[in-house]
Amino acid sequence: MNIILSILILGAIILIHELGHFLMAKVCGIGVVEFSLGMGPRLFSVEMGETRYSIKAFPFGGSCAMLGEDEEADEESAFGNKSVWARIAVVAGGPVFNFILAFVLSVIIVGGVGYEPSTVLSVKEGSAAEAAGLKKGDVITSYQGYHIDLGKDLYVYSYMNELKEGDTVNLTVKRDGEKKEISYKADTNVRYLLGCNFTGDDSAPMTVESVMAGMPLEEAGVQAGDVITSINGVRISTSQEYQDYIREHPLDGSPVKITWKHEGLEYDDTITPKEYRTADSGFSYNIYCEKAKGLDVIRYGAVEVKYMIRTTILSLKELCSGKFGLKDLSGPVGVADAIGTTYEESRSEGSVMLWMNLLNMAVLLSANLGVMNLLPFPALDGGRLVFLVIEAIRRKPVNRRIEGTIHFAGLMLLMVLMVVVMYNDIVRIF
């Protein structure tokens, strides 16, 4: 089922992209030789008029092959014989249709489950945020100079630009119809950690799921799968008992005695918790949906697409800066796995939420495809647009042979990147 869903969603998104090229070509009087869904050998095809419509063996990809697109042609309907503005419209048609699809699906989602306003839910008592005048119910419209439309805008920006100790928090909020500027120095949270994560629910034993590198428990020799049985001589039978103990005796940097079981044998050691300092904005904000009414459904449908586009651009920025690497990229295999995970995790929430989550995944992928195709890289739509814009400025085309060579080189690089990304996806999954 997961594979079928992945093929259907990805196939629909690619079909809409190629349909954008196809329809704009027809509007501009450009001949379309073949319109296909998929790649590789043909499984089925039919000719209608001047165009062959095909379904090919591999369900990822598609094409809209136009007359005279990659070679010289004498026919009036050839791609190269049309005005530069007609060709720009055709090349841009694919990404634009992806954004249109994302908008239509977003309107359906907002109409069904609502949107997520960036409302302040609580302000920590005694915090710098409270002293600066931030109040519960304020709607955040800007954070650190980054425009905020939705709660998840703030979440993504904060995730990619982590607040550091000593940073100044700059907010613009809307309160009772008025905008207010709020600025304050972030508070500092000081915690003391032993350095491990635990498995199981509150009633399960304190089984170590993972140990953090360079942290006290690792240095003591605790390993994943070990069970913590006591702390400072107090027996710990469940995770809840550990939480109760820590609540009554917070870690403060003083040495503590830990006892644990490893392969049936019990060990103990006295370790010193490690200080961990983090910046604290002093407020929590909404990431839950509220119902949209009337024209707000269309407005927030557009805002959702804007969010997806901005998130994709932010991710690309982090990739170029080196914060993200190739290991963070996903190709068709990773996308199919993500769709499958979304399906499995949403089944228990009912059919409405299942479809809303799948549609949300489709919005993300469609907007992502639109942005990626507009990148000024050879072989992509954005790369072709660069040459067309140069032609419009120079009023004469770039040498066709040079342009073809550059696009071919770009295509080879993309193929290598796809192989690397697919390998990473397979390693990550299995």
Image (tube, rainbow, N blue to C red):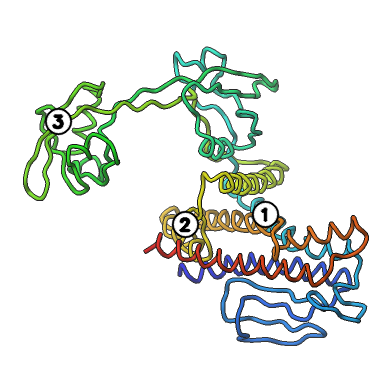
Mark toward the viewer: 2 or 1 = 1
* Viewport quadrant of the C terminus: bottom left
Q: Are marks 3 and 1 in contact (CB under 8 Å)?
A: no
Nearer to the camera, 419 or 169: 419
Mark 1 neighbour density, 10 Å: few (under 14) some (14–19) many (20 or more): many
Amino acid carrying mark 3 in the image: Ile
Mark 2 neighbour density, 10 Å: few (under 14) some (14–19) many (20 or more): some
User: Element at badge 1?
Assistant: helix
Mark 3 neighbour density, 10 Å: few (under 14) some (14–19) many (20 or more): some
Position of 170 relative to 8 (above/below): above
Residue lying at 57% horizontally and 53% vertically, measured from the top left:
360
Residue 126 at x, y = what percent?
A: 45, 13
- Res. 116 mark: none
Residue lying at 64% horizontally and 51% vertically, measured from the top left:
106
The residue wearing badge 2 is 342
Position of 340 relative to 249 (above/below): below
The CA distance from mark 3 to mark 2 is 39 Å
Residue 390 at x, y = what percent?
A: 85, 57
The residue wearing badge 1 is 371
Amino acid carrying mark 2 in the image: Thr
The CA distance from mark 2 to mark 1 is 23 Å
Residue lying at 69% horizontally and 55% vertically, measured from the top left:
375
- Quadrant of the rendered image containing residue 17: bottom right
